[in-house]
Amino acid sequence: MRMRADVSALANAAHELLRQGDAVGAERVLSPVFDQTTAEASVMHLMGLIKKAQNKLGDAEKHLRGAISFALSEGSYYNDLGVVLQAKGEYSEAARVFRAAIALLADASAVRVNLTRCLVAASQLKEAEAEARAYIDDTPGAESWTLLHQVHRAQERHQEALHAAEQALRHAPKMRSLRINVAASLDRLGRIKEALPIYGDLVREAVESPDLALAFARAMYVEGDKQDAEAVLEQAIGLWPDAANLHAPLARMRALRGEKDATAFIEREIAKRPNDLGLRLLCADVLHRAHNDAKALVILDEALRLAPDQSSLLTARGIVLDELNRLDDAIGAYERALRAQPHAASTQRNLVSTLLRAGRPQEALSIARALRQQAPDDQLLIASVATALRMLGDQAYNRFNDYGRYVRAYDIPAPRGFFTTANFNASLAEVLRTQHRVNAHPLDQSLTNGTQTGRSLLSSQEPNLQAFFKAVEDAVRDYVASLPLGLDDPVGRRKSDRQIISSAWSVRLTQGGFQPNHVHDQGWLSSAYYVAVNPTKGAGGRLKFGEPHQPTPGCAADHFVEPRVGMLVLFPSYMWHGTEVFEGQERMSLSFDVVPG
């Protein structure tokens, strides 16, 4: 059936308005005739696109499905429906619809890209890689190789991501985005010397984003050109004065060189834009991280005079007051924040911590248990419940911190190809020392007299690291097998037949170094494997459990493990853990988190 001329003219006008970015105007033009043309696939499709542009995803899905029902072989309609479904988080259905589009379209390149990105968003990375490789086989070029690069990045397979980026660049050697991908891949691999000249050439041509300026400045800083690194960030802030990702590292660089007024640049920007609450919040956060909480409080109080009921400012004020040990005032700030935004989970989590520190465990326990109704596996919330029970003298605490059951040590045998465990650990130690030189960025460190590798070591193809991950598999399986299975067990409730190592990193402490108490929010099981321990006297910086990150009444560390080279310690991620001060030359560990598969 041919569309009436007047309807066609209105549809064309609506389409042009949509193309110009005026979705509201497009709907206004199309609506008067839409009900008369609900059997016209192209009009329904157009209305679906209009609703999608307005982020009315439910309506967009309804209209696009309607369009498909009248045009079952129109592949582009399926693709648009897939995009909407993905935006709604319905990844499985979106992937199915994208595959239908690929079957219907002669040139399905754009749909392959959409399908692959959908699979990445759904964490189906193996399937995403297969689609990206199929795209390369079908249409080798810059776009298909870049898609594979993006998949490898999501997999944290950085060496392969570099190879894919280099292949893409061969097809389009002048394309800036591809050159940036190559430089960023080299950067992630710790090959800063090779990345730096590429960043430099790109910046000399143009600085089109804060991210490029930041990458260039960070690379210069690592290579020792610290003064110019600061200059690059200052110039970039002149172009993007509200870019938080530029202000924070510049302040950090200045603080590391001993500048007492490290946030002066941010404060000058605040003076230019006094109503920019986000900039004030950023300044307070930078000061807090630099342990200058007194000044952070001044910044926040100035901001709250402009916006006295701003929940994020009040929560930040509570955090700073807690750090200053003004616990009652901190609780008051959190309570004001919750009156403004009653269901803010982050504010409630911070309130729980301060209530515990203030000796009010029953209130903390009530809030933490309520939050766990929505996030039962949040490890910090589990830690908060356990701490509250301990303070209340409730024997249920022992179910959470049953050290005899849950903290287990294993001696890891030498992997295949190594004669002794001593030989293996000596080789692994050299590998990790290199990682600490190239992978522990000084701007990202918070340890005292120590470093932590900045990127997950899981993606490394280095043979010693691969051998380590293989060697610990039996210990992880044995640990999981020993867990009781039941919903009433805080660890065993997540027990499964398959486990995945989700992240891995190394910590290296030197004389006077220690790791603050912490939990791993997104973990299930955590670990510490000791690669090198060289104390000069006494204990080698014992691993301690049970002590929260801030002093809390009656909650000193109540379990300790003496580090020993070749020993792997496994324990629940919710247990507070840190280290005693290390006295010696080097204490180096390799750690990983495990989650159910």
Image (cartoon, rainbow, N blue to C red):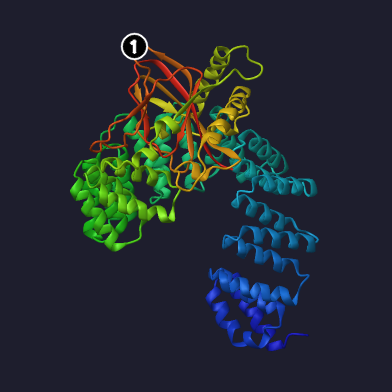
Establish if 454 lies above or below 235.
Answer: above
Q: Secondary structure at mark 1?
A: loop
Establish if 269 lies above or below 251.
Answer: below
Front residue of 454 and 126: 126
Front residue of 70 and 205: 70
Front residue of 276 and 421: 421
Task: Give the residue drawn at x 66%, y 19%.
Answer: 416
* Residue at numbered disc 1: 537
Circle 1 residues within 10 Å: few <14, some 14–19, many ≥20: few
Q: Which corner quadrant holds the C terminus? A: top right
Task: Give the residue drawn at x 52%, y 45%.
Answer: 494
Task: Give the residue drawn at x 31%, y 53%.
Answer: 366
Q: Which corner quadrant holds the N terminus? A: bottom right
Q: Position of residue 32 (x, y in %)?
A: 59, 87
Q: Position of residue 9 (x, y in %)?
A: 67, 84
* Left or right: 548, with 224 as reference point: left
Task: Give the residue drawn at x 72%, y 49%.
Answer: 131
When asked about the image quadrant of residue 28, the answer is bottom right
When asked about the image quadrant of residue 405, the answer is top left
